[in-house]
Image (cartoon, rainbow, N blue to C red):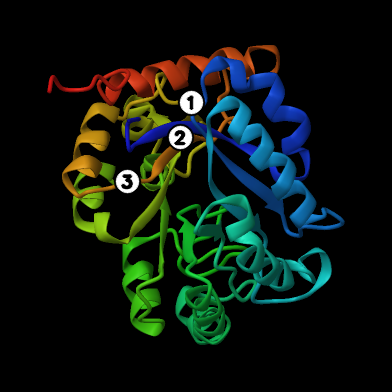
Amino acid sequence: MEDTLRIGTLVGGGDAVRVIPQIARHGFESYSLTFWQTTGKTDLADTAARVRELAEEHQFVISAIGVFGNPLTGTGDNADTLASWERLIDHAHLFGTDIVNGFTGRLTGLSIDESLPKFAEVFGELSKRAADKGVRIAFENCSMDGSWKTGDWNIAHNPTAWEKMFNAVPADNIGLEWEPCHQMVQLIDPIPQLRKWTDKIFHVHGKDATIAWDIVKEYGIHGPKDYVWHRTPGFGDTNWTDVISILRQAGYKGTIDIEGWHDPVYRDHLEMTGQVHALNYLKSCRGGSFVPNPV
């Protein structure tokens, strides 16, 4: 038996077959495959078959597949985002996952409240399509530099928005892809929020933040100095032992997948150094490797 809470990382969906064999030896137990705005020319069925072969060889699972764009506008570079959601929902079973993730989208430049009717229209249909295939939809809690009043990408970055979203589309198979970082950037304490929302958390990104409270107190959050940085787990402020304990207490059986490529220190030639540190750190926070009980 393996631990039911696996630790993995994010990999570009179109690049998974090339990248996973290079990093699997480090001990990643799961991979979340991501696409930016469109699945493009990727043959999903072929990619799924090749990834499943790698999964058998290296003993990992595909935790989620997702597309990150704006499915509510259907314009410009987001013209294929909604169709990509549909394709991923239809192909999820081939990857061995039941989670498709991404942004909700929003009506560009408008408020969250003004975007909700379009969200309800689009994801009301997508949630039904997903339910028919046994798939759950998970929204990342990233603001993408948006606010309540305006933005370009996502409305699922605030707990008040979550309440409105889940009231607008009251489906059991839509939930959150949560991480503490995106809440800490808003100066929200992630721990009490996590306790409240565990029943809607389908997937967890392993990404942390460091808040410079001295800068907040002296300059505020709209001054000339940065006051917060996205961090790889193990280098930020979050108590991941508490995060994992809360998830386990709630019966969470999913994965924590490290979202790299954001840390201002462990980046460039130190990127995988940071990610492997995060992998081992998160494994330690969950209690280490699984140890069977005596019989």
In primary-sequence order, the first of circles 2 and 3 is 2
In primary-sequence order, the first of circles 3 and 1 is 1
Image quadrant holding the C terminus, namely top left
At horizontal 61% and vertical 55% (from top left) the residue drawn is: 66
At horizontal 58% and vertical 72% (from top left) the residue drawn is: 106
Of circles 3 and 1, which is in front? 3
Dot 1 amino acid type: Thr
Picture layout, residue 121 above or below residue 79: below
**Which secondary structure lies at badge 1?**
loop
Of circles 2 and 3, which is in front? 3
Picture layout, residue 149 above or below residue 214: below
Which residue is the site of mark 3? 253
- Tags 2 and 3 touching, CB below 8 Å: no
**Front residue (pair 73, 95):** 95
Q: Position of residue 43 (x, y in %)?
A: 82, 55
Q: Label 1 neighbourhood size at 10 Å, few (<14), some (14-19), many (20+)?
A: many
Which residue is the site of mark 1? 232
Q: Position of residue 6 (x, y in %)?
A: 40, 34
**CA separation in Å, label 2 and label 3:** 19 Å
The label shown at residue 207 is: 2
Q: Quadrant of residue 199?
A: bottom left
Picture layout, residue 285 above or below residue 262: above
Q: Quadrant of residue 20?
A: top right
- Tags 2 and 1 touching, CB below 8 Å: yes
Q: What residue occupies the far right of the structure in this picture?
A: 41
**Front residue (pair 212, 82):** 82
At horizontal 50% and vertical 82% (from top left) the residue drawn is: 128
